Image (cartoon, helix red, strand yellow):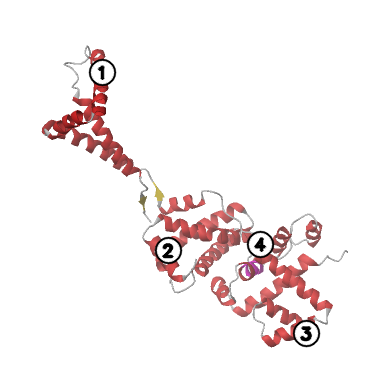
Amino acid sequence: MKNRKELKQLIQKVLDNDEAACQKILNLYKGRIFSYVYRMVRNYHDAEDITFDTFIKCFKALATFDTSKPFTTWLFTIAHNLTMDHFRKNKHEYEYLDERHASSDNLVQKYDRKKKMEQIDEALLQLPPVDRELVILFHKEEYSYKEISEILDMPITTIKTRLHRARNRLRVLVHEKPTKT
Amino acid sequence: MKHKEIERLIQKKLDRELSIDGKRKLDMHLAQCPQCTQLYQEMAQTTRSVTELIEFYPQAGFNARVLAKLGLKRRFAWTRAAIAFIGSWVAALLLFAYSPLPAQALNRLATSIPAFMRLYDKIQIVVSSLNQVLSPLVKGSINTLNPVIGLVFSIMFVYFLGKALQKEVECKA
């Protein structure tokens, strides 16, 4: 979206039940939201369902959206909350999910046959969901700490600490070979 | 400078929060420490890889599903088309039954445009043939004006149908 005024006009059109405006919002943001959700839940159908619910919720609550605030932050907040609901329903411990599935051996074995992007995606998967989410929001979506704090409803200091730890872990997963036992 | 301090500066740089002074310190240290340079390069490459991650998309038809759920979708207005159909039919019948104007207009058209006259003659041939076939079955004979009414009606119907087929948005949201 070029500027806030343009976005305001688009939102007004959506509120006036303009189908084309809804399509435009969907086309602008569905890729970003779906990618974020998919990288969190790692299941295509679940990701599509959550993305679907995100946009339904977004359009229905659009009248309450404060247009002086960033739209994408609000959209990502909805997506985040629905992703958390998904984790809760499926009894995943989002905050403290351990890394028992992490397997550096497998990662290194895959290094030679997988492309770099696939490798980083694999490495992200080894991170606990909350850390993965922070890495994606900060580095992929390029949100500031303040914006991430709004989306996740988490203190900035906590975000910083976790992100630093996550980056270190990610670097180890991607670059360092495990010590053989 | 201790490596731990450099690691903190690296993190600050990746946080997009490194001051000019901090950047100077980091650059100076990296220029003389291969160990920290490797760490920095690996960290930078890792975060750059995250930035360059590909975007995934939901399946085709996702937009349509969302719009349908919201009650925002393209619909064929069957009700409107039916009303237009019946309305134009009744209007045409009433017009031909009670007003001399359509008949006069048709006569003028027939005399001024030879092509229309030829078309009218051909229609009459078809009507006569139908008359021959249907005459044992129906009382009286078929009025030749009926096909003309049908033609006018068809034009009107196509016009209103075209209007009805235009994109229509109904929102229940």
Where B66 falls versus B158 (above or below)?
Answer: below
**x and y percentages locating residue B124 in the rendered image:** 23, 20
**Label 2: few (<14), some or many (≥20) within 10 Å?**
some
**Label 4: few (<14), some or many (≥20) within 10 Å?**
some
Task: Please report, as a chain letter, where disc 2 is located.
Answer: A
Task: Please report, as a chain letter, where disc 3 is located.
Answer: B
What residue does disc 2 label? A10
What residue does disc 1 label? B125
Task: Please report, as a chain letter, where disc 4 is located.
Answer: B
* Cα distance between the residues tagged 1 and 3: 101 Å
Helix, strand or loop at label 4? It is loop
Q: Which mark is residue B28?
A: 3
Residue B100, quarter of picture: top left
* Cα distance between the residues tagged 4 and 2: 28 Å
Q: Quadrant of the C terminus of chain B?
A: bottom left
What residue does disc 4 label? B53
The kind of residue tagged 1 is Ile
